[in-house]
Image (cartoon, rainbow, N blue to C red):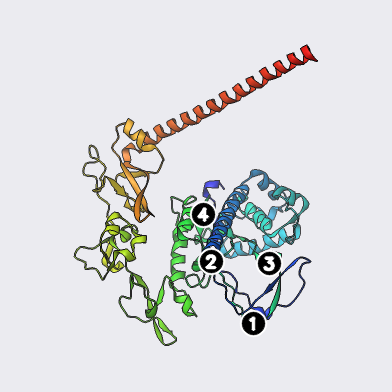
């Protein structure tokens, strides 16, 4: 299967709660860490909180990049040929198996691979590469999963690598029941090792039993909204990392999977603690309503928690905030709530919001899908633009019909040289020093100009690469020339004065 059809996925499994009743004073490792727990709760300083977040971000990004490269290795033709060579002939014809037979086949293949490879436990030794592990028939768990994925892809099946990162948490998730108990922890237990497994697509019902990255956490976490989301990294970093490896086309199996995830979120059970309701995406207690939120309508009641009614959550947002979600306020709608702008200043989406004294807020029931402006005359017309001379394209559906978004850096200069009408694309706002600033990414042009623009951009970029190469080559030749001259001079001096 070609690499552009493959997807590796990342999920984030919620941290396990430590129950000290099940812990014993056991010597697991000669070098251990003694932790004494007292009733005193030490307040975290801003420096410590910042350091925790930095460690969490760095660990998350390192895991992300590592498994991205690890997944690319699984497309190697060398690995595919090696693993196919050890399979019996009966395992090779699987392309059109029925769902039930496919499930049986996967179990039999897993058993066979367990009989061929010995799974080693993690230790302090340097792990072997995939090729060395194959030759010695000794693998770690993630390498075993990798071999399974390689075989699936070699046989023409759509298979993806799933990874639970488990990065170092920036929040304390441990609940201690016995504060006077002294526990002894092994150094290796301070950090959970990433978990890996494989998913195979069932071609009959287009469900998973492609390189882009997709978040599938909701499939494996029972309390996704109540716990898991709150342990994640900042939303901006998360979205940025996923956007770098996002698919720009949606296949039928992706659409079915997205609907499955939405249904799972809607059917999530009610949280069992009051903390679980805080910032929950679906449910809310009336006592936890914030200034920019509202319960509308107050029926139906989804349940009771300690005598308090549980409602569906509906966030109120400003006109600019709804625009970022590709929604516009309906004509004649009156704001449900008005708040002081300074309470939302740090979340301002535009200069208008930051400068006004008050900010009207609207609910989703007062909005409609955003309709982008239309090109009046496609043949001789200009790209539509707003009052600021640019265009908001926070989402792909905000691009006008008969137009396209080309998100290449510096392509606006090429459009100017070719005298092609364009507008700058505003993809988001960033807040800095009390004000919000638009972030421009590429341009919007008419669809008919796309090919000529992209071709010209590629020619310019190729010329830049060639010029850079010639510049480096000139520097290398110059340095070698200087070195040779110095060697000749040194040799002459040695002959004269030796």
Which percent across, then down, holds residue 176? 61, 78
Residue 242 vs residue 134, the one in the foreground: 242
Distance between the Cα atoms at labels 1 and 2? 25 Å
Q: Determine the residue located farthest toward the bottom in the rendered image.
A: 307
Q: Is residue 152 left or right of residue 434?
A: right
The first of marks 3 and 1 along the sequence is 1
Numbered disc 4: secondary structure: strand
- For disc 4, the marked residue is 213
Residue at x-position 33% and y-position 76%: 295
Residue 229 vs residue 219, the one in the foreground: 229
Residue at x-position 45% and y-position 76%: 277
**Residue 178 bears which disc, if any?**
1
State the image quarter where residue 259 is shown: bottom left
| Number of numbered discs | 4
- For disc 3, the marked residue is 189
Residue depth check, mark 1 versus mark 2: number of the one nearer the observer: 2
Distance between the Cα atoms at labels 2 and 4? 35 Å
Residue at x-position 45% and y-position 54%: 251
**Residue 45 bears which disc, if any?**
2
The first of marks 4 and 3 along the sequence is 3
Which percent across, then down, holds residue 36? 68, 75
Distance between the Cα atoms at labels 4 and 3? 28 Å
């Amino acid at each position: 299967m070609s690499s552009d059809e493959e997807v590796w996925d990342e999920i984030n499994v919620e941290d396990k709660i430590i129950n000290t009743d099940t812990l014993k004073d056991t010597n697991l490792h000669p070098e251990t860490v003694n932790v004494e727990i007292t009733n005193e709760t030490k307040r975290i300083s801003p420096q410590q909180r910042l350091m925790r977040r930095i460690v969490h971000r760095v660990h998350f990004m390192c895991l992300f990049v590592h498994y991205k490269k690890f997944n690319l290795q699984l497309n190697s033709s060398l690995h595919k040929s090696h693993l196919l060579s050890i399979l019996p002939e009966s395992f090779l014809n699987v392309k059109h198996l029925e769902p039930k037979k496919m499930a049986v086949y996967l179990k039999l293949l897993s058993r066979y691979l367990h009989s061929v490879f010995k799974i080693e436990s993690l230790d302090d030794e340097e792990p072997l590469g995939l090729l060395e592990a194959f030759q010695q028939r000794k693998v770690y768990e993630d390498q075993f999963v990798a071999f399974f994925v390689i075989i699936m892809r070699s046989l023409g099946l759509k298979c993806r690598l799933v990874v639970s990162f488990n990065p170092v948490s920036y929040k304390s998730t441990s609940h201690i029941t016995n504060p006077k108990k002294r526990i002894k922890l092994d150094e290796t237990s301070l950090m959970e090792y990433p978990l890996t497994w494989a998913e195979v697509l069932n071609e009959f019902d287009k469900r998973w039993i492609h390189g882009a990255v997709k978040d599938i956490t909701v499939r494996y976490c029972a309390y996704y909204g109540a716990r898991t989301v709150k342990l994640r990294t900042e939303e901006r970093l998360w979205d940025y990392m996923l956007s770098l490896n996002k698919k720009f086309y949606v296949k039928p199996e992706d659409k079915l999977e997205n609907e499955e995830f939405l249904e799972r979120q809607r059917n999530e059970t009610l949280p069992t603690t009051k903390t679980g309701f805080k910032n929950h995406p679906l449910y809310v207690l009336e006592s936890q309503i914030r200034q920019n939120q509202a319960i509308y309508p107050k029926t139906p009641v989804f349940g009771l928690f300690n005598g308090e009614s549980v409602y569906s959550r509906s966030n109120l947002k400003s006109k600019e905030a709804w625009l970022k979600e590709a929604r516009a306020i309906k004509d004649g709608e009156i704001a449900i709530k008005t708040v002081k702008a300074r309470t939302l200043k740090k979340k301002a989406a535009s200069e208008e919001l930051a400068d006004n004294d008050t900010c009207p807020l609207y609910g989703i029931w007062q909005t409609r899908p955003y309709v982008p402006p239309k090109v009046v005359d496609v043949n001789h017309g200009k790209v539509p633009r707003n009052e600021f001379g640019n265009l908001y394209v926070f989402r792909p559906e905000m691009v006008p019909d008969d137009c396209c978004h080309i998100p290449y850096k510096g392509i606006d200069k090429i459009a100017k040289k070719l005298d092609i009408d364009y507008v700058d694309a505003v993809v988001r706002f960033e807040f800095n020093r009390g004000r919000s600033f638009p972030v421009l990414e590429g341009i919007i042009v008419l669809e008919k100009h796309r090919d000529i623009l992209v071709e010209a951009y590629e020619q310019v970029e190729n010329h830049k690469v060639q010029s850079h190469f010639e510049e480096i080559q000139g520097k290398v030749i110059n340095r070698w020339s200087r070195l040779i001259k110095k060697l000749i001079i040194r040799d002459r001096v040695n002959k004269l004065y030796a």
